[in-house]
Each structure stands twice: as structure tokens, then as C-alpha cells.
Image (cartoon, rainbow, N blue to C red):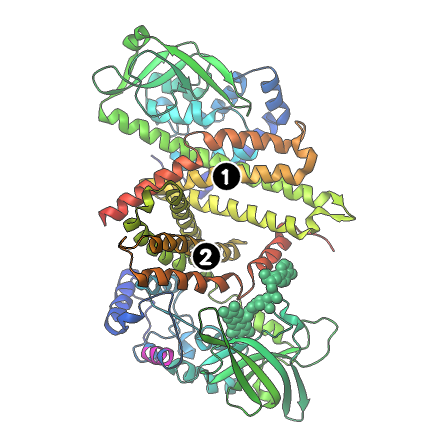
Amino acid sequence: MQPDRNAMSDADFAAELRAWLEAVYPPHWRDPVLRLRGRDAEWWYARQWQDGWRAPAWPREHGGLGLSVEKLILYHRVTEDFGIARTLDHGVKQVGPILVQYGTEAQRAACLRPILEGTQTWCQGYSEPGAGSDLAALRTRAEREGDSFRVNGQKIWTTQAEESTHLYFLARTSAAPKKQMGISLFLVRRDAPGITVRPIRNLLGEREFYEVFFDDLLVPADAVVGAVDQGWTVAKALLGHERFAQGSPALARHTYRLLCAMAGPLGAFDDPAFADRIARLGCDLSDADALYAENCAGVASGADLGDSLPIAKLVAAELFQAMTECLQDLAAEARARPGCGVSAARIDEAARVYLMSRPYTIFGGTAEVQRNIMARSLLPLRD
Amino acid sequence: MAALSSDDRQMLVDSAETLLARAHNGARLRRLRDQGIAFDAGFWRLMGDAGWLGLRLPEAAGGSDLGAAAAVALAEVMGRHAVPDPYVAACHLPAVLLGDSDVGAALATGEIGVAVMEGEVPLRGPAEVAVGATVPGGEILLLADRGNGAEILLLRLAIAPELRADGGAGGRVSVTARDLAAADVLLAGSAALGLWQKARDEAALVTAGYLTGLARQALALSVEHLLQREQFGQKLAQFQVLQHRVVDLRIGVRLAEAALGAALAAPEDRMRLHAAKARASAVASATTRQAVQLHGALGFTDEAAIGLYLKLAMHHAQAFGSEAAHRTAHARLSREARNAA
Ligand SMILES: Cc1cc2nc3c(=O)[nH]c(=O)nc-3n(C[C@H](O)[C@H](O)[C@H](O)COP(=O)(O)OP(=O)(O)OC[C@H]3O[C@@H](n4cnc5c(N)ncnc54)[C@H](O)[C@@H]3O)c2cc1C
């Protein structure tokens, strides 16, 4: 059992979390742009578990910290301010909450504890070559054969597929009149016979996402989460989980600090064009912060937030990108002015952050698709 | 100052909605403009009777001392209804400067409005001065330096009305050396400068509320239009490019609301204030421009309501500091904070 920290005062809670991070977190990982993977990520998950700081949002009866919303918000704030690296951690963020809501006793027993311990890690097989934004167009088939399903098809963009021990994926289990019907959600070991993966190099030169091929993969029927053919509902339910945190402008703030640090030695604050741009970004950050704070307060008080959560998510992603664009332009200045006091490492960091920010308007629902969804409620058309 | 509970706020908003629905509409606005009426004394009186003009005044002056939050709530409703009357320029701003003087008491009832010199640099001698409103009684507040440091002065002078292309009404006053010498002193010294600044800050904040309410309504009018008008055999609202534009306008309005809330919650934080007015000015301008575009030719008519919103946005986006001015001020404070750290 991890300790129950809900009774602590906010100040004590924050101080204890902070002190723990100071004590155990490797200083060279204090970079919110970094993403841990493989052994590094596993080490960090295990450490969180040993020290009683794992799975903040999971209910206590399932081994999580069971934090109240207020404490959860604080948890995010402290870890962001500290500057911890990002982790995929689909086990904690996605699979655990799904199993708590839809899983069988056996599924929970097989997964929850190992996820907490950091020995079972998960990747997500949703997207396919023909099913991106239009996820329901997916064509991977799972056909019933006695007590099993036989799976054939292909996934793509599966992040960290190679090092993950497990995969959860969506496949079509029956032909249905509406394409969202007839889809099921499966859990499977990544090393099951019939699964092969192939890395795809991304713009940063990393091999972080993969193609996943299913060739006559056999999965037992009890690997389906929730009812057969109801996978769309199961997968959708997840989207609500800790969704407020996606609106945090932490990466934008981090990049704003980088660009202010570069602008100083370059004298860019005294350059009219840069000064105006930075001034604009400073105001944008202030307002994004204000919106995120309102959302956190609203989540905590149970208020109806309307469209404020998706707005904050879009704002945070697009502002992060705008920050990296300004940083990159400052880096160009720095490159053109040898001896200006900005190191080559800083200049290269700008390019990396610029690249790294690109997918923030692509994954988890593209910015355009999010606008489509928001437009539906803003402009209610009767069909 | 009394804190504004959410019930009080709702009551204020409801009563403002009721009164404005009854006593104000586009026809009134157009009539004032067409007849060159810079100050509608009858409507001003109504606002006084409703208690709006005393919101910011101390109880000793017949006010309710509810502070900026109440004024912002009220201004949002005024923006929503496209009310052209100079509530901020001729009531809220002077109320902060006047305190519990007799003039404050007359302001609270709606007997008079009070004009205030534009700008924050003290007047150093006779000059022609721009004021934010034309008030019939000619009560004017000036920031001046007559040789002994800054002073806030109260004068009574004829104001020449100035009707602008954006429909807003300001005024011009010739201040002579004799006028300056004869003026009443309300406050002197660094306290005068501080109060002047505080009053302008509050005016900017309340104006941000007005602009936010205005932008929200301009968006609602556009949504209504897109849902009703058909071209190419479908509703305009079915065109994705227009849907995305509406979403972007909604995002702007939401940010303006959040920025305003943050500024109200931290009255001492001038960075929040600058961010809020910069955002509100930008959002109201962009929303009304897009709204006109989304209305097509109808948007360019004097008859359609949306044009009134565009012009009021033009006027108030500039009042008490434009987007650029506040953004620059935000950047200056942000730089000072960084250097201090
Ligand atoms: C770094 C990264 C990691 C990822 N990790 C995973 C993972 O672990 N597991 C997983 O399953 N998936 C993952 N994805 C995939 C991600 O979910 C998809 O990229 C996303 O759903 C978009 O699909 P797509 O790439 O096929 O783009 P498309 O859907 O082909 O879109 C291309 C462009 O068209 C636009 N567009 C599409 N439809 C519309 C429409 N109706 N209206 C207007 N514009 C439209 C899009 O906005 C976009 O600009 C990852 C993606 C990235 C970039």
C-alpha cells in the first residue's frame, strides 16, 4: 500500500513531493523536453513505486495514491515546476484506468500490480495506415475461433512499441452498420507470436514510433476489455481521464524561459521586431496560465467547464509551438553573431525543441479535428 | 470595500439585463449618433437610479462601494448590449479619483457625469486638452503640475464635443492659466500620481470587461447568422473553414475571460492587468472584424447590429491603452521581474 497523502496540508504535500524529487530524481533528467524510455523509464517507474509516489490518480484500493482532485492538480504543478522529463507510461495513464472501469478481476490481477511496479509497460496500437484522424476506419480484423481471436492487420505510429512488454489495441470484431460499432479492445503481450514491429525514424532522428504487424496472432477471448464489439466506448471513456492536465502550458513556459535566456545576451529585447514578438508571447503565456488555473479550480469544485478543457489543450499546444518558432528565430540570430554569448549547445537545443513540438498538434486528435469537434457544439446544426 | 458574492454579481447582471432590454437598443444608439448627442442625460439618470453610477463610490458619497469586480460584471453586460454611454470614462474613472466629495455624490445619483483628461503626463500650463467624454455640466478632472508637483484638479469648463468616426464621443477643452489657478485641488504629491495611475488601471480593467462582453455577443450574432443563412444549398455553418474561424474566435473570447478573471483576482498584479486589457482589445477587434466578414455585405450596413459592435470595439480597444501599449507595458514589467530575480 502506498501512503495516503490526502489528509496532508497542501503545503506539506508539495514540500514532501519536492523534497523527494530533489533526493532521488537524477539531475541530468531535469528537462521537460526529454522523454524517458526503455530502462530509464522502467527505473523511474520502479522508483516511484518503491517510494510511494506512483499512479497518483488511481484509486487506493487498486494500489494508486488515490489523490483528491486538489492534490492531483498540485502533484502536476510540483512535478512540472521541478522539470521532470516526460514519460509515455501508458500503463498508469491509460491501461490502469480502463481496467479499473471495465476490466475483469483476472485482468486487473494480471496487470495492475506489475504496472505499478514498473515491470509491465504498455504501448498503444490504435492508429493504422488508413485510420488516423478517422480512427473508426480501422481495418485490423480479429476473428473469433473458439476461445480465441485470430488477429490480422497492421498498426502504425505505435510509440515505444519495441521496449514495451505489452500492447493494447483496437480491432474490428464484427461488420457493423456504423463503423464505430463492432470494434473491440484487446490486451496482449508484445512478444506474442504473430506480432512483429518495425521502427520508424522521426524528425529528431529517434526510433521512437513503430509499425506493428499482426500475422495470425492468437489472443484468448478473455483478453478483450469490456464487452466484445464495445471497444470504441471503452477507449473513448479514457479520454476524460486527467484531461485537465493536457491544458497545462508547462512546455510553453519552459520554452519561454529558454527564449528569454537567449534574448538577453542577444539584445533582442531592444530589437523592435523581437521585442514585440516576445511581448506578445509573454501575454499569451499569462492568459494560457490563467485559463489553466481556472480549469483546475473548476475541476476541483466540480463546475461545468463547457468547452474550456479542449480550448486549453489547443491553446497550450499551439502556444508551445509558437514559442519554439520564436526560439528558433533567435537561434538564427545567435548563429549569425559569433561571440554573442549563446553557446552552440543552446542553439542546437532550439532546433530540437522546434522539432519536438511539431507533433503536439497531431497526436491525440489533430488541432483541426479538435476544431471540428468544438464547432459541433458551437454551431449546432440539425442533420 | 465590500466583497462581491456570486449572488450579488448575478443580481447585478440580471437587473442590468432587464434595464438594458427595456431602455436601450440599436435605435437609441443610432439616434444619439444621428442627432449628434454626445451625452444622453436621460439615460445617465436611469443608470444613476439603478445604482450603477455609485458602484465604485464610497457609501459616504451615496455609493455602494462594490469595487472593480462589480463594475466589470456590469460593463460586460453593457458590452453585450452595445451600450455607447461613457460609463467608464465619465463615471468609473472619475469615481476612483473623487472619493467621497460632493461631486462624487452628484455623480452617484446621475445628476452629473465627470470628464477626465486623457493621458498620464501632468499638464504643465495652459493647453487644449482631450477629455474622455463630453459632460453637460463641464466637470473635469485634470492631472497637472503647477510648479509644486503633481495635483489632481477639479474644474468646471465648457467641453467641445468630438464625435468620432467610430461613433465614440470624446471632447476638447481649452484650459487657461486662470482656470488652472482657480481649480480645486483634490489631491497633491505622489499620492496624486499614484491615484491617477490606479484610476486608469481600473478604467482599463473595466473596459476589458466591456470588450469581453462585446466580443462574446459579436460571436453569438455571427453564430446565429451562420446557422440561418444558406448559400450553395447549405447553411454557412456547414463550411468547415467558417467553423474553424468560429472556434478560433471562441478560443479568443475564452482567453479574454480567463485573463480578466486572473486580473480581478490579483488587483495588485499589474502584469495581469496589462495582459487582460491587451487580450480584450485584441479579441474584441478581431472578433468584430471577423463578424463583419462572416455577415457578408450585410455586415457593412448601418442597419445590421454587428456594425455597431465593430465600432464600439474600435473605440474601446483604444481607450485606456491599446493592445500594443498594454503588451509593451507587460513586457517591461516582465523584464524588470526577470532582472530582479
Ligand atoms: C509522435 C507521435 C506519436 C504517436 N503515437 C501513437 C501511438 O502510440 N499509438 C497510436 O495509436 N497512434 C499514435 N500516433 C498517431 C496519431 O494518433 C495520429 O497521427 C493522429 O490520430 C492523426 O492521424 P494521421 O497522422 O493519420 O493524420 P491524418 O488523419 O491523415 O491527418 C492529416 C491532416 O489532415 C487533417 N484532417 C484529417 N481529417 C480532417 C477533417 N475531418 N477535417 C479537417 N482536417 C482533417 C489533419 O488535421 C492533419 O492536418 C502518434 C502520432 C505521433 C505524431
Q: Amino acid at mark 1?
A: Thr
Tell me what residue is drawn at x 66 percent, y 34 percent. Answer: B299
The span picked out in magenta is: A41-47
Q: Amino acid at mark 2?
A: Gln
| Image vertical order of residue A127 relative to residue A300, above or below | below
The answer to whether residue A129 of the structure is visible from this angle is yes
The residue lying toward the viewer, choosing from B31 and B297, is B297
Read off the chain for label 1: B
* Residue ID for mark 1: B212
Q: Main secondary structure of the magenta part?
A: helix
Tell me what residue is drawn at x 62 percent, y 27 percent. Answer: B26
Residue A356 position in % (x across, y down): 44, 65
Residues tagged by mark 2 and mark 1 found on one chain of the structure = no
Q: CA distance from mark 2 to mark 1?
A: 26 Å
User: Ligand 1: which quarter?
Assistant: bottom right
Query: Residue B104's image quarter?
Result: top left
The residue lying toward the viewer, choosing from A340 and B44, is A340
Residue B1 position in % (x across, y down): 33, 34
The answer to whether residue B71 of the structure is visible from this angle is no
**Helix, strand, or loop for circle 1?**
helix
Residue behind label 1 places its C-beta within 8 angstroms of ligand 1: no
* Residue ID for mark 2: A321
Q: Are marks 2 and 1 in contact (CB under 8 Å)?
A: no
Read off the chain for label 2: A
Structural crowding at the residue carrying mark 1, measured as other residues with C-alpha within 10 Å and reported as few (<14), some (14–19) or many (≥20) = many
**Helix, strand, or loop for circle 2?**
helix
Q: How many marks?
A: 2
